[in-house]
Image (cartoon, rainbow, N blue to C red):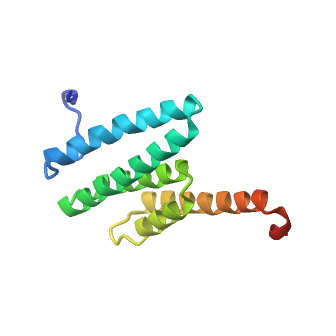
Amino acid sequence: MKLKRPEGMTGLDVSALSEQHHQKGDYKSRLLLEAHLRWEEFHDDQALDMYAEVATLEEELMQGCRAAGVGPKYFIHAFSAALCWIKAADFYRARHLCNTILAQSDITPPPREKAEALLQGVREGQQASWEKLNPKLAA
């Protein structure tokens, strides 16, 4: 089911993206909702697997946007992928993706600041996890 944009409301021009790209985005959105539901129902392992699959799909969508020249959507998918990697407990992939975002030549200040903050949060989260899991080694 396609939602129709309200009259007079403008958005990003995504006409360069294929129907397959849009279908993948629809599937990704449904899977993300299912992952949230699984997490809320305490099916942690299922949710983690689903978040990892969503992150992979977001990365594919991100690359599709870059190839089609839809830069703003690239960053939207990139941030979503990074957040899903965090939810999947794959901090290495989240850090790598944040660094990839920061390496883009067309990044503007707002997404740069967001990526830097997200990267700092991942680093702090990793450090806190390390200290909790290895209290004698962290000192």
Image quadrant occupied by the N terminus: top left
Q: Position of residue 58 (x, y in %)?
A: 35, 51
Q: Position of residue 54 (x, y in %)?
A: 39, 47
Residue situated in front as seen by the camera: 66 or 28? 28
Number of residue marks: 0
| Residue 63 in view (yes/no) | yes
Q: Residue at x 50, y 39 (%)?
A: 46
Q: Name the quadrant containing residue 128.
A: bottom right
Q: Residue at x 25, y 62 (%)?
A: 66
Q: Residue at x 52, y 45 (%)?
A: 48
Residue situated in front as seen by the camera: 31 or 118? 31
Against 89, residue 139 (above or below) is: below
Q: Position of residue 20 (x, y in %)?
A: 17, 46
Q: Name the quadrant containing residue 107.
A: bottom left
Q: Name the quadrant containing residue 33.
A: top left
Against 54, residue 130 (above or below) is: below
| Residue 80 in view (yes/no) | no
Task: Classify residue 72 as left or right of residue 89.
Answer: left
Image quadrant occupied by the C terminus: bottom right
Residue situated in front as seen by the camera: 88 or 2? 88
Q: Residue at x 59, y 32 (%)?
A: 42
Q: Position of residue 14 (x, y in %)?
A: 19, 48
